[in-house]
Image (cartoon, grey):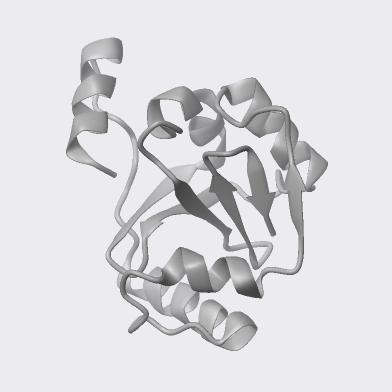
Amino acid sequence: MEHFKKELFFQEHNAHISCQPISNSEMLFLNGFLEQRYGINNSINGNFFKVLLKKLSYKKEYDGVDTSLEIEAVFQDLALQNDSEVFVIWNYPGDMDKFDLSYLLKYWEDIWFSVSDEAIGIFFPVMDRIIVVTHYNVIYY
């Protein structure tokens, strides 16, 4: 997550944002998932979202994805609320964070900035599913 978002969160909530780095074993799990399911490996620097969007089978447009209520409705619609933790992929393989799903939903407006974030990946490790959230309100899955 970009440093300016962490600073804004601290100014707004007088607390540090609660995200964790992904452990080595979690990274190996994610790498294996992407390699086996989509043929994507961690040498894809810079083209991750472009490649992943071509490999995902479905896309769906929503009225919005900018608020906590909107993204929670997306997760409900796609039956993605069974995981307790998610990995947010800002840039693969270099910039990823782990969030408690309920925390991500609660503070979505502080995490996702559609003005500066063109796309992010959200990996649901228990369900072995990944989605891409785009700034133009389309979810790829």
Q: Which residue lies at the image location 48% right of the left edge and 64% below the top edge?
A: 49
Using the rendered view, name the quadrant where residue 46 is placed. bottom left
The image shows residue 73 at horizontal and vertical percentages of 74, 31
Q: Is residue 87 left or right of residue 38?
A: left
Q: Position of residue 5 (x, y in %)?
A: 26, 31
Of the pair 137 and 30, the residue shown nearer to us: 137
Position of the N terminus by quadrant: top left
Question: Residue 15: x and y, percent?
Answer: 25, 20
Q: In the rendered view, does 109 fall on the left or right side of 8?
A: right
Residue 111, image quadrant: top left
The C terminus lies in quadrant = bottom right
Look at the picture and state if 123 lies above or below 3: below
Observer-nearest of 91 and 24: 91
Q: Nearer the viewer, residue 78 or 102?
A: 78
Apparent side of residue 44 relative to residue 124 in the rendered image (left or right): left
Number of callouts: 0
> 117 above or below 64?
below
Q: Residue at x 63, y 82 (%)?
A: 37
Q: Nearer the viewer, residue 39 or 60?
A: 60
In the image, residue 78 sits, relative to residue 65, either above or below, namely below
- Percent across and percent down for residue 105 are 56, 31
On screen, residue 33 versus residue 117, left or right, reads: right
Question: Which residue lies at the image location 28% right of the left edge and 22% below the top edge?
Answer: 9
